[in-house]
Image (spheres, rainbow, N blue to C red):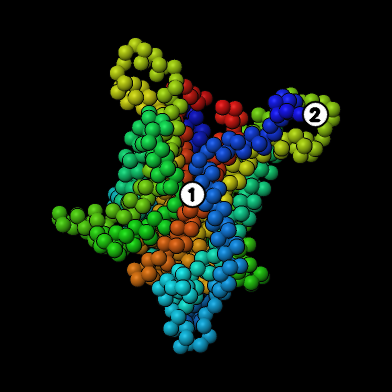
Amino acid sequence: MLTYALRRLLLSIPTLLFISLVIFFLVDLAPGSPASEIPLTVPAEVRVKILEAMGVNDPVHVRYLLWLKQFFWVEPLHMIDGWFGTTFSEGMQRIISYQSRSPVMDIIAERIPQTLIVIGTAYLVAILIALPIGIYSAYRQYSWFDQIGTFVSMVGYSVPTFFTGVLFIVIFAVTLGWFPQIYDTTHEVTDWDSFLYQVRQMAMPVMVLGLFNAAEISRYMRSSTLENLNQDYVRTARAKGVSERSVVLKHVLRNSLIPVVTVIAIGIPTIFGGAIITESVFKINGIGGALIGAIHANDLPMVQTLTFIFAILIVVFNLIADLLYGLLDPRIRYE
Amino acid sequence: MSDAATAIAAPQPRGRFADVWRQFKSHRGAVAGMVVLGALVLFVFAGPLIWRVDPTFVNPDAVEMMKSRNKPPSLAAPLGTDQLGRDMLARLMAGGQVSLAVGLVAMMISIFIGSTIGVMAGYFRRLDGPLMRMTDLFLSLPLLPLLLVMMMLFRDSLAGAFGPEAGAFILIVSAIGVTSWMQSARIVRGEVLALKEREFVLAARSIGTTPTAMILRHVLPNVVSPIMVAATLGIAAAIITESALSFLGLGFPPDFPTWGRLLYDGVQYMQLYPERVIWPGLAISLTVLSVNYIGDGLRDALDPRIRGR
């Protein structure tokens, strides 16, 4: 198991390097230039110097290696400095955004809490809704509950989040006026009232993302439970007089959770991607919004760094899912 | 001749297609999906023959244009008009043509790449490792951000080469195709690997069939079912991706209607005219839902383990 984990970990390094290469060179083809962001009142010779200082004129492989160094060496060092008050990264150049001229990682660090709060809550809600529905509709297969559940999950899975989001805004914010239409990022929770406001403004994005993910997870849960309900060990458990409750909730549940847990783990990076849409529907100032803004403003370092962070998330969670599968299922032995 | 005699004389062997169709018909969701999708296709492609209003017509007379803006539903415009006085019903039809076309063409590209790579990887052992590594790599790319980046990068150059609409169409279709073939490649590879061990392949090889003929005559016809299911589901995914891109403002150019673009344009006015986001959104959702149901039904119908029952 340990050797397998180590091997996978080592293998993911070339994978990530290759992905970073693809992302960097693809984004680097962009027609926009950082020069367009410099005001026209700046004299020409100063403009040349600014561009030189930004390192735009260097050949592309130099910039790629520099970016790699900044991403994997300077930024972690800077993070350590921030935590322990050391000065490892003093005098080192960090990844600078073309748009705001501030370090990209600072912007991401500002934005990520919004994304994490909304997405994390939505995913938790999705799991909490999906598991009981999946189990019960498998247990009562072809009952009216199962029929409705399957239909609803098909609808939830098919209707895109940008439509459910807009629909919810029309219904709950415009017509009924229950929830605010736009997510206020600057809102701070200090007392009970502000906490209630936070809950209200989170309700719609969480519902939209949660419903979409719940639909997917409950489909997996249902089929996984169905598969286990017909196994021999279930018949044995019933035959020896184990109560129905503990047959389903102990024997079957534990076994059918194994594949679902990996599905949940693999789904985490994809909901970060899907959150790009939800964030733009509800105007949440998270990393998805930052990516869209950077793309529209031709802010190449920002786009490269954010896209690469998404790629890291995917690779890491795929690894976690594989390892979890081996840990949870004793039938699977990794050499 | 009596009826009984013909019944005995001709126990018509049911063909594979009839068998599949019989199973498909018993899947209620799939049949409903076919009906809804058929109605939508009819609405989108036959509708403009009846409702002959130009979807891009803006009244050149400024006063008339101002008067024709934001009209509520009426006999002259059953779904009202938009902020420039264009007829919403006609725009919905025109948008549907583009959205469905994008879904179909993107699916074809993705299926072509996917099944080529899948067959290659499954059939030639030497190619299996590299091709599957490449598939894994593609699967770990962050697709939506990359699609957005691709739209930003190539939109202007392709618009210059083919005109704004055709350029956007080519770009969107190929971008979606290039980023969505991985699942079908994996499925096809698995099927081909299993197929390679069967006797008829051995028999074909023993009489000296060349690899090309083997793939075209013996392998491909036998992996058609999983490819068809993947293709159906691929249409739905492509339509959603196109609308998402248009919704984020990185799809088709502004005055070119697609369902996603109409939804995006409607969002600005949704407080006053909520129907402007609801109609295109409903159209996207119904299409995707019915296509997904058809895919489900096809999967059941094409699965011989289920079909026998």
Find numbered disc 2 in the image and state the secondary structure of the residue it sits on: helix
Spatial CA distance of label 2 from label 1 is: 42 Å
Question: In which quadrant of the rendered image does the N terminus of chain B lie?
Answer: top right
How crowded pointer 2 is (Cα within 10 Å; few <14, some 14-19, many 20+) is rated as some
Depicted A148 relative to depicted A25: above or below? above
Q: Amino acid at mark 2?
A: Ala
Give the chain letter at badge 2: B
Q: Which quadrant of the structure image shows residue B98?
A: bottom right
Residue A313 visible within the image: no
In the image, taking residue B50 as reference, residue B205 lies left or right, namely: right
Depicted B217 relative to depicted A72: above or below? above
In the image, taking residue A7 as reference, residue A218 lies left or right, namely: left
Q: Which mark is residue B289?
A: 1
Closer to the eye: label 2 or 1:
1
Sequence-wise first label, 2 or 1 = 2
Residue B246 at what x, y percent from top left? 50, 63
> What residue is at 31 percent from the left and 47 percent from the top?
A121
The mark tally for this picture is 2
In the image, taking residue B116 as reference, residue A277 lies left or right, namely: left
Judging depth in this view, the residue of A329 and B90 nearest the camera is: B90
Residue A237 at what x, y percent from top left? 36, 15
Residue denoted by label 2: B204
> What residue is at 31 percent from the left and 55 percent from the top?
A204
In the image, taking residue A293 as reference, residue B30 lies left or right, namely: right
Q: Amino acid at mark 1?
A: Leu
